[in-house]
Image (cartoon, helix red, strand yellow):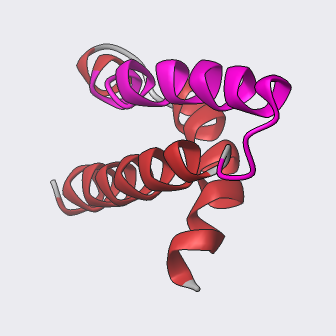
Amino acid sequence: MLLMASVPAYFVIQPALLMRWSGGWRRAAMLPLVLTVPALLFSLYALFDGSNLWPLTLIFAAGISSLYLVVLWSVRWWM
């Protein structure tokens, strides 16, 4: 259930951190885009191809990316 909630959380956290942070922190916050953009494109391709499992790659990628962003936010907050 938490993994499913990470998808909308990711799409809120990612832009918020990119708008608020600058410098090296912003570059570090951009790193999950390397994983999620291809996952999003593949999910859209699978959706239009008629696959019933199309959201799985995006769900897993957003889960990993959300976890990374929360850890990054925690590290920045404690420093």
* Left or right: 75, with 58 as reference point: left
Q: Residue 35's image quarter?
A: top left
Residue 37 is inside the magenta segment: yes
Q: Does 22 appear above or below 7?
A: above
Residue 50 is inside the magenta segment: yes
Residue 3, given in percent of the width and then of the height, sits at 51, 72
Residue that extends furthest to the front in the rendered view of this protein:
50
Q: Tell me what residue is drawn at x 53 percent, y 37 percent.
A: 17
Q: Does 66 appear above or below 54?
A: below
Q: Which residues are magenta?
A: 28-53
Residue 68, given in percent of the width and then of the height, sits at 30, 51
| Front one among 26 and 8 | 8
Q: Does 66 appear above or below 34?
A: below
Q: Does 7 appear above or below 12?
A: below
Residue 47, given in percent of the width and then of the height, sits at 79, 33
Does the magenta stretch mainly form a helix, a strand or a loop?
helix
Q: Tell me what residue is drawn at x 44 percent, y 58 percent.
A: 63
| Front one among 9 and 21 | 9
| Front one among 27 and 46 | 46
Q: Tell me what residue is drawn at x 56 percent, y 52 percent.
A: 56
